[in-house]
Image (cartoon, grey):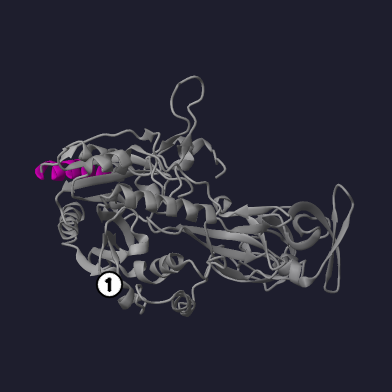
């Protein structure tokens, strides 16, 4: 198994601790002039999304995580199970609600998402940064009010509730930023 | 460190205001030394000799070809050897503003290539050296004269432990109480490793907050090239300046005994071997200089980039360097 030593430590490193994959989100080098160098790291558990603080001294090593990112098409949902297919190999993957996390709000059948595999098993899925979704229902807005700072709730075709400006109407298509969940604009058909 | 290149990489990371401040502080520094009748010197950055220290990793340069040069050569980790050779050859009190290089040191307070200000004052005791450093710090930063605090007092005050008498188990227990994550590999016989951990996590962040502080009388095991003062406990006549929790300078009442230096280099190499690091050559011209007689002096090395950083109110040395390592 490949390992990283402290001189290779940097933000973005994917490592393995106690069998779980982690992303190094911060690495702070501290060293008294005549003393031992320490690497104070923040690591994000890529399965549970929890943060872990760990301190290493120079020369320490961490096991590298076998993480692969693939493009996979969302096929369908069955209860709490989500099915995806890798475009090139036609390999199918089944993800639970925990792995899909917030992504369920944005994914439509046929959408190509990026998926993280840890030891060849899916651990997370990320939708494209921008998605277009149809508004299934929203309360009629006050006429003439085109201000974007007045918002209301809208149920979109994935079943999720989004916050949209007052002027958005049922049946319209809207573009959403999946990284923030924010409404961007209306889209014409 | 993989190179990250983009089209904006040619630009400096420091703003012009900070680069002007840097130049102004350099000017003020030279003026200060000039007022104190100290001679500016320059010694080689690239040398056949290198400091042997457990925790310092020099860049190694292979000259190649038929240069006839010693192989390998080293980029200096500080101008210490060259300056002490000048002292042994009869120089007056001297200073140097020199680039120094340390492998693997990169972070908000570290760049592998950095500017070190180093000076030696003949006949100064440790107390004289502390007073001079305090004065220089006041002139450069204008935050008043530095307080002084022994290493012992600093640990007592901020870590609640006696750093000279506490056993490794006590130090480790204190570290555990701090609630900070500890390196699993820190071994039970590495007493200095635990002291460094407590220093970094509990003591140092609280040093020099109201005004700069100079910590003195380090454990004899951390003497580097400082003289050890007989007594109980044995302490190294070494001192460090801190401001806003940042280490700015390190000084020694200088070790004069070449036999003692040989012993320390051998110990440092043994520790390097145990740490899995390459050993460094123990033969050098400093030994010959010390054998011919090094005069009594106190020497101090100050990190100039950090000084500018503090004066600028910056959070990282990158804000005061034209081109840090990744853009070098």
The magenta-colored residue range is B20-36
Q: Residues within 10 Å of mark 1 (few under 14, many from 20)?
A: few
Provide the residue designation for mark 1: B232
Please provide percent x and percent y for residue B210. Answer: 24, 68
Q: Height in image: B307 above or below B113? A: below
The chain that hosts pointer 1 is B
Quadrant for the C terminus of chain B, please.
top left
Query: Residue B102 vs residue B313: left or right?
Result: right
Examine the residues drawn in magenta and state their main secondary structure: helix
A131 or A101: nearer the viewer: A101
Query: Residue B57 vs residue B251: left or right?
Result: right
Residue at 55% over, 41% down: B4
Please provide percent x and percent y for residue A61. Answer: 61, 57
- Count of all numbered marks drawn on residues in the image: 1
Residue A51 lies in magenta, yes or no?
no
Please provide percent x and percent y for residue B149. Answer: 24, 69
């Amino acid at each position: 198994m490949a390992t990283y030593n402290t001189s290779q430590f940097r933000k973005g490193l994917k490592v393995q601790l106690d069998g779980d994959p982690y992303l190094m989100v911060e690495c702070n080098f501290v060293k008294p002039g005549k003393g031992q160098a320490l690497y104070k790291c923040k690591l994000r558990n890529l399965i549970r999304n929890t943060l872990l603080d760990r301190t290493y001294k120079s020369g320490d090593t961490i096991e590298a995580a076998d993480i692969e990112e693939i493009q996979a098409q969302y096929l369908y949902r069955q209860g709490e199970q989500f099915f995806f297919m890798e475009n090139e190999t036609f390999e199918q993957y089944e993800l639970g609600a925990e792995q899909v996390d917030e992504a369920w709000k944005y994914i439509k059948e046929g959408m190509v998402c990026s998926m993280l595999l840890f030891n060849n098993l899916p651990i997370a899925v990320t939708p494209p940064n921008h998605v277009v979704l149809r508004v299934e229902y929203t309360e009629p807005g006050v006429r003439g009010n085109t201000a974007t700072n007045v918002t209301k709730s809208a149920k979109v075709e994935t079943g999720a509730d989004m916050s949209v400006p007052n002027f958005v109407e049922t049946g319209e298509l809207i573009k959403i930023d999946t990284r923030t969940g924010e409404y961007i604009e209306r889209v014409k058909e | 460190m993989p190179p990250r290149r983009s089209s904006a990489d040619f630009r400096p990371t420091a703003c012009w205001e900070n680069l002007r401040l840097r130049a102004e502080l350099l000017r003020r520094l030279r003026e200060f030394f000039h007022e104190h009748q100290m001679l500016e010197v320059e010694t080689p950055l690239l040398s056949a000799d290198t400091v042997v220290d457990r925790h310092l990793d020099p860049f190694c340069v292979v000259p190649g070809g038929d240069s006839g040069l010693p192989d390998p050569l080293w980029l200096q980790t500080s101008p210490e050897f060259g300056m002490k050779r000048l002292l042994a050859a009869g120089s007056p009190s001297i200073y140097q503003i020199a680039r120094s290089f340390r492998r693997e040191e990169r972070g908000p307070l570290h760049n592998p290539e950095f500017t070190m200000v180093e000076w030696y004052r003949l006949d100064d005791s440790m107390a004289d050296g502390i007073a001079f450093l305090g004065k220089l710090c006041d002139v450069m930063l204008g935050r008043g004269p530095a307080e002084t605090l022994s290493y012992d007092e600093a640990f007592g005050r901020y870590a609640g432990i006696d750093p000279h008498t506490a056993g490794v188990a006590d130090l480790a227990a204190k570290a555990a109480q701090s609630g900070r994550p500890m390196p699993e590999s820190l071994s039970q016989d590495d007493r200095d490793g635990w002291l460094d951990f407590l220093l970094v996590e509990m003591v140092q962040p609280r040093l020099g907050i109201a005004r700069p502080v100079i910590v003195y009388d380090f454990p004899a095991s951390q003497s580097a090239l400082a003289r050890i003062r007989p007594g109980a406990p044995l302490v190294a006549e070494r001192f460090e300046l801190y401001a806003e929790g940042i280490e700015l300078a390190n000084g020694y009442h200088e070790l004069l005994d070449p036999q003692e230096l040989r012993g320390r280099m051998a110990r440092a190499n043994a520790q390097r071997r145990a740490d899995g690091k390459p050993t460094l050559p123990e033969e050098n011209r400093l030994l010959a200089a010390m054998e011919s007689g090094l005069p009594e002096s106190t020497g101090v090395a100050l990190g100039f980039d950090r000084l500018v950083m503090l004066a600028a109110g910056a959070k990282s040395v990158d804000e005061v360097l034209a081109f840090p390592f990744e853009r070098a």
